[in-house]
Image: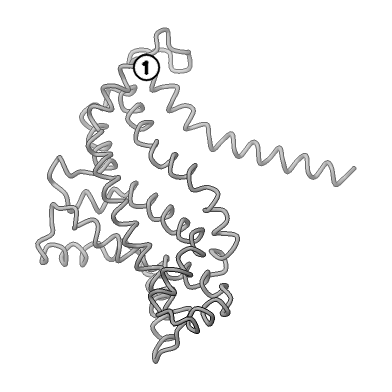
């Protein structure tokens, strides 16, 4: 009986935490369907007339910035997954002089606060002439995202039985063939973890795009939604509708990759 009571209380606490986590999302959707006047005068009351125009106007305002964020995130995550998986394969399955020292230096980079790198990284991007272009976002994202990606991939690849690699080498397969035919198919879960984590961070990044982009057609969603909140600071329904539209890509990505995401964490991601 006591054990059942503990289980009941644990479920109740988890349900409460889940409800508190979803409350801001529900409130955002609720307010996005109301007019600006109703939000101010009757905050908690249901809308007398659902304002679908908030969504149409918000989509017309921010759709290009969402496409920009998606393009940058997809290209950057593709580069991160490729570099992380290839480097993780080398660290996990090859012996070379200075391997441990290089890996320790890689671990040290994880401890460096990213905010300390903003100024030197900005100077470097400016010297390369990449300001106000997508490359000013993509290349730094790949360089920064691969650090954690290599750690996760190395831990996952270390769990793959050595018999697979020995059999492939006996059949005459080269290292890149082994990487392409054996490592990549088996590592889909951990690569999904790397992709989702980095996609989420890149899509929501605000500071770095604000620093390197000036062209309105290149601005990402996080910057565009900030501009929208500033220009239409009294149009709360429109702003909340823009938030809801902008959150759809991340929601769909997480739902599509949830199976592999959980599998990657349980099979090897946490072992890194």
Q: Position of residue 76 (x, y in %)?
A: 30, 57
Outermost residue to the right: 1
Q: Residue at x 54, y 80 (%)?
A: 167
Q: Is residue 45 left or right of residue 161?
A: left
Q: Position of residue 217 (x, y in %)?
A: 15, 40
Q: Is residue 209 left or right of residue 214?
A: right
Front residue of 243/20: it is: 243
**In which quadrant of the rendered view does residue 90 lie?**
bottom left
Say if 177 sits above or below 129 in the image.
below
Outermost residue to the front: 171
Outermost residue to the bottom: 97
Q: Which residue is mark 1?
A: 40
Say if 186 sits above or below 100 in the image.
above
Q: Residue at x 48, y 17 (%)?
A: 44
Q: Position of residue 62 (x, y in %)?
A: 25, 33
Secondary element type, mark 1: helix
**In which quadrant of the rendered view does residue 37 lie?**
top left
Q: Residue at x 45, y 22 (%)?
A: 30
Q: Residue at x 28, y 39 (%)?
A: 66
- Total label count? 1
Q: Is residue 233 left or right of residue 26?
A: left
Q: Position of residue 137 (x, y in %)?
A: 23, 56
Q: Is residue 211 left or right of residue 15?
A: left
């Amino acid at each position: 009986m006591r054990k059942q009571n503990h289980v009941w209380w644990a479920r109740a606490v988890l349900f409460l935490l889940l409800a508190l986590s979803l409350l801001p999302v529900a409130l955002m959707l609720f307010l996005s369907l109301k007019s600006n006047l109703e939000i101010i005068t009757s905050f908690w009351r249901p809308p007398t007339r659902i304002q679908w125009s908030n969504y149409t106007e918000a989509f017309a305002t921010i759709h290009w910035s969402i496409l920009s964020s998606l393009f940058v995130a997809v290209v950057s995550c593709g580069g991160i997954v490729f570099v992380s998986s290839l480097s993780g394969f080398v660290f996990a399955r090859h012996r070379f002089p200075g391997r441990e020292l290089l890996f320790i230096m890689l671990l040290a980079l994880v401890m460096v606060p990213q905010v300390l790198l903003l100024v030197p990284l900005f100077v470097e991007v400016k010297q390369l002439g990449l300001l106000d272009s997508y490359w000013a976002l993509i290349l730094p994202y790949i360089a920064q995202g691969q650090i954690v990606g290599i750690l996760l991939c190395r831990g996952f690849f270390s769990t793959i039985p050595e018999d697979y690699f020995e059999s492939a080498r006996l059949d005459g397969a080269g290292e890149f063939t082994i990487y392409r035919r054996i490592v990549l198919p088996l590592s889909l879960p951990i690569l999904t973890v790397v992709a989702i984590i980095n996609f989420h961070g890149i899509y929501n990044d605000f500071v770095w795009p604000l620093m390197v982009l000036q062209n309105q057609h290149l601005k990402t969603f996080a910057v565009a939604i900030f501009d929208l909140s500033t220009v239409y600071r009294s149009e709360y329904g429109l702003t909340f509708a823009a938030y809801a539209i902008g959150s759809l890509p991340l929601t769909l990505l997480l739902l599509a990759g949830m199976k592999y995401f959980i599998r990657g964490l349980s099979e090897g991601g946490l072992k890194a």
